[in-house]
Image: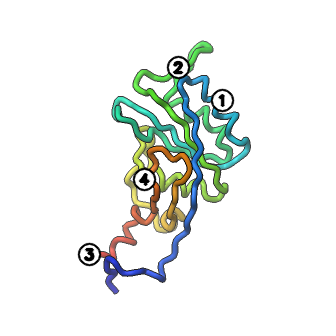
Amino acid sequence: MKKKYGVLMSNYKCNIIALEWNFKKIPHPKNLDEAKTEMMKNNSGVYVFEGCHDSRPEGGILYIGQSKEIVSRLDKSSLRIIWRENGELGFFADVWDITLRWAVIEEKSVKAVESVLIRAHAPSFNSKEIRNVIPSDNEAKNLIIFNDGVKGRLLPIVAGHYFDNEFWKGFG
């Protein structure tokens, strides 16, 4: 049966997750440690580095990551924007006006949420999943994310179905 636009698909299954975003401006890389103290330790979730880059001088989402323990993962992820040498650190010359955003979520959902957020926002420093189709067995396919709190440039609502070829085959 052909699906039609404007018709309620009541037999359609989806999972909804609401994220409450927190943030910390990072005027200098040393301020990343201050942000980590504001985050709760041992919490799973997703995080976003937002700011300006030579490829996005007006600003945008630079990197989206996830972890079972956000705070422990930040140091590795920050290597995309921060250089460290002989005890000194600084931002790379091609990034500025950095803000760190994070949302705490259940550990079982972090990978699916990150996957949908990356596909929806196409961050400058994520390349793995941008514009790829979500595999049909992936829980991200049935996920709708509501971004709330201090979400910055994150879209208010994103859906995994947007990146699912099987879903769209019934239209048109």
Measuring 59% from the left and 52% from the top, which residue is drawn there?
20
**Callout 2: helix, strand or loop?**
strand
* Circles 4 and 1: CB atoms closer than 8 Å: no
Q: Nearer the viewer, residue 33 or 92?
A: 33
Separation of residues labelled 3 and 4 (CA atoms): 23 Å
**Callout 3: helix, strand or loop?**
loop
> Which amino acid type corresponds to the residue marked 4 in the rendered image?
Arg
Separation of residues labelled 4 and 1 (CA atoms): 29 Å
The disc placed on residue 34 is 1
Above or below 59: residue 138: below
Precedes in sequence: disc 4 or disc 2: 2
Q: Nearer the viewer, mark 4 or mark 1?
A: 1
Res 31 → quadrant: top right
> Which amino acid type corresponds to the residue marked 1 in the rendered image?
Glu
Across and down, in percent, residue 114 comes to 53, 52
Above or below 25: residue 88: above
Question: Badge 2 local density, few (<14 within 10 Å), some, or many (20+)?
Answer: few
Residue matched to label 4: 119
Across and down, in percent, residue 26 comes to 55, 29
The answer to whether residue 71 is left or right of residue 166 is right
Precedes in sequence: disc 3 or disc 2: 2
> Which amino acid type corresponds to the residue marked 2 in the rendered image?
Gly
Precedes in sequence: disc 3 or disc 1: 1
**Callout 1: helix, strand or loop?**
helix
Separation of residues labelled 2 and 1 (CA atoms): 15 Å
